[in-house]
């Protein structure tokens, strides 16, 4: 552009903090080396309130300072009076024609050019833009060039600003590509600055988080540098992938807060709401439909046009990528995390009130009427505001308030329920409770009021009126009916209030029930919804213990009693176990090196119930004999068929040991007694030893197991 | 030819192959079983000799094909009335035996896994009026069980000792008879081999 005879201006635009100023500063540093250019950097920030004359005087001062630095002293004055005329008519032409060498040209670098187009700087802009267009741009296109930097899209500039910019080239300043990002990251790993060693994994991780956002890349790398140099290392620290997680990311996000906050402020309300919704949804692609659902879930009643077009604008600003069809996602993960952390949708959604200025004004009028106690007119304006912007939070709150005052609880409830889902504050909750109580009063049917009281208790578990109503229900209705009603309520949403009342009902139902099975069923349900309920635990523990005792599984019974804190029962059972195991130990000891182990086997539970401790292998408690209980049945049948009678016992001859099993049919519980020989023992000694002991063991087992009725 | 017809022929072909495989499997099993059944003539006199040669306390010896649930051959002392009765009863008790052996198999699988006390040599069932002693013979293509039934409930030690001594002799005799039979069959099928 610079050597061009006519086209002597360019606009650089892009989101805030993307590096536009850095580009200008780079031009300022490089241009003198690349040709006969003298760049003049001029920042318009904070100059929006200045008059055109002041602005031109300041520009002239800056040009003079730069020229002096270049050895070109300009002593001319004349800008003290009417600079609007003298600057372009005499001052600048003199600089160009007389002061500058013939081959040199000036390049004016205007930073923050769009501040002059801000609403509070319209006056300065209104004068400066036409001045630029009419007097400066055409002054000397060959020797006077312009670079303007703006922090918004050109389309968003006012007509008057556009009239200047439309004659110029425009170039977007966007995210860095991967190679440039790599160069930026590795500035600390270069020849002149070897203060960090970067691994590929770490570089990839930075790229993954910043996607080439120059500012965020810089902040993250700076945080890393400080962290790694904090402990004064003796050699150059190496950056690995593990260094870039958790705290360091959080610290980089915090460090970026003010800069990103400035970027955020530059976004219009609808774009802020959509960006916040997308950020909260995580690092994934969100389709248009999913985005609409997210907005609806957070209280957006209608996704109005501004919200629908917001993704397109966010994409123009390089904040998100994708299409409406394929879905959108954030381009820069660190930015997404910053928005998710500092700009949650619950807060940002208040911006929805500003979406439609007319609706906001209507709300303000309505508020005036409301304060003057003119509810009818207030309602009229609020309904109009609601039609224009159904998402106006304050308008909805006021509308519900007036509807309640006018005894229209149904519509008020609808509005308040919706408001409460995304704004569960005490004011909304109290209004909602008020609406529900009104509705309960108005609905006298059998079940109807209960539903409203249920909802009240969900909102306030200790609400007195609803509490009283439910207590009445527990005493007046049958406990079964009450439980059914409460089960329905609880199953709807597992709400704490429903749970609390269902626990009360179940306890009452269990206490008034004589049937043990029914009682167990009630307590099981109770334990499902209240796993720590002591009453249920004790009852079920006692039942399990009794059942285990009946099956001869005293260890399981002991366990059940202990879990249920039934200490007396546990001590009783423990004593029985010790007594039996001591007895088995004595038998093994007296067998004089013939029997190694004696164990009692539960055929129903398929496990060793008790066993001697002396010389027994450690695994004996875990021995499993599978379907052993079938053996006596089929062998009895077989013995009868071949006329040899029923089965007495089985001997398994193993490589070194003999295992003998006696099936006892004297007890209600199916049990077997097993004897394992000492290795190398023959059947001649082992067989008679087991025969001797089996009757003693049976006798002992009678103290523990219930005998069959016919045996008694 | 269009795709559905090709698919139809492939399905028919697969079905035929499956049927053929099943048929071959059945024929092989039957052949093995037949060999053992045909050996009966030679094995039974040996069982007879073993039972009668001593005062062993053994009343019945039987060989059971565990894979096909069949008593292949058995011998019961004929000079005792109870023995004759047992011979008839053994045939009808086959079903119970199948259940008993299947059950025993499961028990021992579990037990072997949990105790790691080594493989089972034999299992003795002490009945009210007799003893049943079972050995698994694993040197044959068909899994065989060799069973001994005593005359009475008493004398467990002597009975087990006697049956223990006979197991090896019966196993050797069975192997010899089977190999002789298979050799003869090959000669009949292929006379030039003489």
Image (tube, coloured by chain):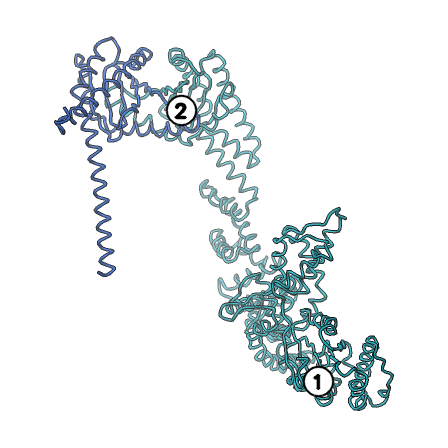
The residue pinned by badge 2 equals A672
Please name whichever residue, B119 or A70, is drawn nearer the observer in this view of the structure.
A70
Using the image, determine if residue A424 lies above or below residue A248.
Answer: below
Element assignment for label 2: strand
Q: Percent x, y for residue A219? A: 70, 61
What residue appears at the point 48 percent right and 16 percent down from the top-left corner? Answer: A588
Is A187 situated left or right of A478 in this image?
right
Q: Residues within 10 Å of mark 1 (few under 14, many from 20)?
A: some
Please name whichever residue, B100 or A445, is drawn nearer the observer in this view of the structure.
B100
Work out whether residue A674 can be spotted: yes
Q: Which chain is cyan?
A: A
Q: Earlier in the sequence, mark 1 or mark 2?
A: 1
Q: Classify residue A280 by image quadrant.
A: bottom right
Q: Residues within 10 Å of mark 2 (few under 14, many from 20)?
A: some
Q: Quadrant of the C terminus of chain A?
A: top left
What's the mark number on residue A142?
Answer: 1
Q: Classify residue A30 by image quadrant.
A: bottom right
């Amino acid at each position: 552009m610079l050597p061009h005879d006519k086209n002597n201006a360019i606009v650089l635009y892009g989101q805030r903090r993307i590096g536009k100023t850095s580009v200008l500063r780079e031009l300022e540093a490089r241009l003198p080396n690349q040709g006969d250019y003298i760049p003049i950097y001029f920042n318009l920030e904070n100059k929006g309130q200045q008059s055109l004359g002041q602005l031109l005087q300041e520009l002239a001062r800056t040009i003079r300072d730069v020229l002096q630095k270049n050895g070109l002293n300009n002593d001319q004055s004349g800008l003290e009076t009417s600079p609007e005329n003298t600057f372009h008519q005499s001052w600048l032409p003199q600089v160009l024609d007389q002061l500058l060498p013939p081959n040199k040209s000036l390049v004016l670098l205007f930073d923050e050019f769009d501040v002059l187009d801000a609403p509070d700087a319209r006056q300065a802009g209104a004068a400066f833009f036409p001045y630029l267009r009419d007097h400066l741009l055409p002054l000397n296109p060959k020797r006077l060039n312009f670079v303007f930097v703006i922090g918004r899209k050109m389309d968003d500039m006012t007509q008057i600003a556009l009239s200047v910019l439309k004659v110029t080239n425009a170039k977007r300043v966007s995210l860095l590509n991967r190679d440039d990002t790599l160069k930026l990251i590795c500035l600390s790993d270069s020849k002149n600055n070897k203060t960090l060693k970067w691994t590929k994994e770490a570089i990839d991780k930075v790229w993954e988080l910043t996607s080439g956002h120059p500012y965020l890349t810089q902040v993250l790398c700076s945080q890393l540098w400080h962290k790694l140099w904090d402990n004064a290392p003796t050699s150059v620290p190496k950056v690995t992938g593990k260094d870039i997680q958790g705290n360091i990311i959080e610290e980089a996000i915090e460090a970026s807060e003010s800069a990103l906050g400035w970027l955020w402020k530059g976004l219009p309300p609808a774009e802020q709401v959509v960006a916040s919704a997308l950020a909260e949804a995580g690092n994934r692609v969100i389709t248009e439909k999913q985005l609409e659902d997210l907005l609806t879930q957070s209280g957006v009643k209608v996704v109005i046009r501004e919200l629908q077009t917001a993704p397109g604008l966010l994409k123009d600003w390089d904040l998100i990528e994708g299409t409406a069809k394929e879905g959108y996602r954030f381009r820069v993960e660190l930015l997404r995390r910053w928005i998710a952390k500092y700009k949650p949708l619950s807060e940002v959604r208040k911006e929805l009130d500003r979406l439609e200025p007319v609706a906001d004004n209507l709300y303000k009028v309505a508020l005036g009427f409301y304060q003057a106690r003119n509810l009818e007119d207030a309602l009229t304006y609020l309904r109009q505001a609601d039609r224009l912007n159904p998402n106006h939070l304050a308008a909805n709150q006021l509308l519900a308030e007036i509807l309640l005052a006018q005894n229209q609880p149904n519509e008020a409830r609808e509005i308040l329920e919706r408001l409460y889902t995304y704004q569960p504050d005490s004011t909304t909750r109290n209004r909602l409770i008020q609406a529900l109580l009104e509705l309960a009063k108005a609905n006298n049917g059998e079940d109807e009021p209960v539903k409203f009281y249920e909802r009240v208790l969900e909102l306030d578990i200790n609400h007195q009126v609803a509490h009283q109503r439910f207590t009445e229900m527990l005493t007046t209705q049958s406990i079964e009916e009450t439980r059914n009603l409460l089960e329905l309520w609880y199953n709807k949403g597992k709400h704490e209030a429903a749970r609390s009342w269902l626990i009360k009902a179940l306890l009452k139902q269990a206490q008034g029930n004589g049937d043990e099975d029914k009682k167990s069923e009630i307590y099981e349900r109770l334990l499902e919804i209240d796993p720590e309920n002591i009453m249920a635990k004790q009852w079920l523990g006692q039942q399990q213990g009794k059942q285990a005792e009946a099956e001869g599984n005293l260890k399981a019974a002991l366990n059940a009693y202990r879990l249920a804190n039934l200490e007396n029962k546990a001590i009783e059972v423990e004593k029985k176990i010790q007594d039996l195991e001591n007895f088995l130990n004595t038998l093994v000891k007296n067998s004089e090196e013939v029997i190694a182990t004696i164990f009692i086997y539960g055929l129903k539970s398929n496990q060793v119930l008790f066993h001697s401790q002396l010389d027994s292998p450690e695994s004996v408690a875990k021995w499993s004999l599978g379907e052993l209980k079938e053996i006596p049945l089929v062998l009895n049948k077989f013995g009868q068929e071949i006329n040899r009678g029923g089965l007495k016992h089985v001997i398994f001859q193993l490589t070194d040991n003999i295992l003998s099993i006696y099936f006892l049919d004297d007890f209600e519980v199916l049990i077997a007694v097993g004897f394992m020989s000492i290795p190398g023992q023959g059947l001649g000694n082992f067989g008679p030893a087991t025969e001797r002991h089996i009757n003693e063991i049976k006798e002992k087992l009678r103290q523990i197991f219930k005998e069959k009725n016919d045996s008694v | 030819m269009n795709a559905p017809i090709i698919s139809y022929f492939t399905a028919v072909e697969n079905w035929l192959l499956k049927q053929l495989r099943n048929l071959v499997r059945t024929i092989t099993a039957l052949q093995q079983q037949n060999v053992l059944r045909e050996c009966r003539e030679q094995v039974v006199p040996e069982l007879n000799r073993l039972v009668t040669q001593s005062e062993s306390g053994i009343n019945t010896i039987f060989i059971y094909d565990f894979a096909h649930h069949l008593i292949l051959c058995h011998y019961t002392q004929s000079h005792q009335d109870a023995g004759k009765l047992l011979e008839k009863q053994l045939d009808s008790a086959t079903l119970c035996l199948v259940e008993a052996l299947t059950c025993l198999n499961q028990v021992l699988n579990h037990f072997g896994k949990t105790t790691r006390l080594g493989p089972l040599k034999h299992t003795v069932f002490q009945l009210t009026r007799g003893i049943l002693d079972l050995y698994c013979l694993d040197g044959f293509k068909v899994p065989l069980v060799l069973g001994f039934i005593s005359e009475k409930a008493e004398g467990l030690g002597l009975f087990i000792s006697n049956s223990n001594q006979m197991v090896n002799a019966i196993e050797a005799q069975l192997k010899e008879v089977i190999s002789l039979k298979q050799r003869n069959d090959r000669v009949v099928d292929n006379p030039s081999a003489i």
